[in-house]
Amino acid sequence: MLTPLERKQKKKKLFRWIKVLLLLYAVIGIALYYLQDYMLFHPLTIEKNKKYDFNYPHKEINIPYNAETNFNIIQFSAKDSTPKGVVLYFHGNRKNISWYAKYAPNFTGKNYEVWMIDYPGFGKSTGKFSEQRLYDCALQLYKLARTKYDPANIIIYGKSMGTGIAAQLASIRDSKYLILETPYYSMTSLISHYLPIYPIKRIVHYRLPTYEFLEKVTAPVIIFHGTDDGIVPLSNAEQLKSVLKKNDEFVIMKNGSHNNLNDFPLFHQKLDSLLER
C-alpha cells in the first residue's frame, strides 16, 4: 500500500505527463493549422523557359487567368489525326505534370487527346493556391476543351487529390464520363482518419467534399481503388458508394495500392472498354 508521500509523488508525475501530452497535442494542432499547405501538397516548380522532353507528341500552352495567375497545360496528342475526344486529367498532390505524363498513353493509344493542367505553384503554373483556385483552373481547362469538343466527347479524369477537383467540375459541367482513381470521401474525412482526436473541419482550410459533388454529377461515374491503399484507405473511398447512381461503377483491385493501379490488367481492361465505346 502506498504511503501518503508516494501517492502525492505519483499524482504529481501523472499531472506532469498530462501537461506534456496537452502541450504536444497543442503543438501538433498549431503546426497542422499553419503548415498544412506544406504537409498536404508537395509541388515542384519548373523554370518558365525550360522545355519538357516527353517521349510523346505534345503541345504546351498557357492560360493567363489574372495578373499573378497562369495555368500551364500540356496537350498530349491522340494517335490519329482525328481524335475521338479529350481526357481532362487532374493529377495528384505531388510534383507536376512531368510526374504524371507516363499515364498519357493509356488514353492517347485509344485515340483520345489528354490535357493535363498544373495547379498554381506546380510546374510552370503560377498564382495563389487555394481550394477555389483549384476549381477555377479546372473550369478554365474545360472551357478550353469546349472550343474544340462537345461534352459527349469530353472525359473528366481525377487521380488522388485531383479526384475532388474532377468531381467538382463534373458537378457543374457535362461530360461523357467522370473517372476517379483512388478518390477520397472528402479531404477533411481523410485527414480525420489519421488524426481523429483533432477538430479537422475547423483546422484544415481544404474541404474538397467529393461526396457532395457526386450527388450532382449526371455523367456515368467510374471509380478505381485498391484494397491496400495506404494513402486513401478503401474504407474512406467506399463511403462514396452511398451517393453513386444505379449504373455507376466501383472497381476494386485486390492488393492494389495508391500508386500502382496502372500495373493491374483489370484496370486497363475496364479503362479500355470505356474508351472504346
Image (spheres, rainbow, N blue to C red):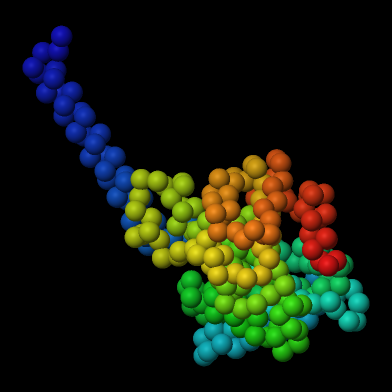
* Residue 145 vertical placement versus 234 (above, below): below
Nearest the eye: 4 or 225: 225
Q: Position of residue 11 (x, y in %)?
A: 16, 26
Q: Residue at x 72, y 72 (%)?
A: 176
Question: Where in the figure is residue 136, as x and y percent of width and height?
Answer: 54, 79
Q: Is residue 50 left or right of residue 84?
A: left
Q: Quadrant of residue 271?
A: bottom right
Q: Quadrant of residue 71?
A: bottom right
Left or right of 207 in this view: 99: right
Q: Residue at x 84, y 77 (%)?
A: 84
| Horizontal side of residue 179 vs 70, given as left or right | right
Quarter that holds the N terminus: top left
> Quick check: can you spot residue 183?
yes
Where residue 185 sits: x, y (%)?
53, 56
Q: Position of residue 154 (x, y in %)?
A: 73, 76
Q: Quarter of the image containing the C terminus?
A: bottom right
Furthest residue in direction right, as rendered: 80
Q: Is residue 95 visible?
A: no
Toward the viewer: 188 or 68?
Answer: 188
Q: Residue furthest front?
A: 246
Compared to 265, does 6 lie above or below? above
Depth order, front residue of 242/7: 242
Give the mark count: 0
Compared to residue 133, the image places residue 182 above or below, namely above
Q: Residue furthest left?
A: 4
**Residue ID at (79%, 49%):** 266
Splitting the image into 4 quarters, where does residue 79 fall? bottom right
Residue at image x 19%, y 33%? 15
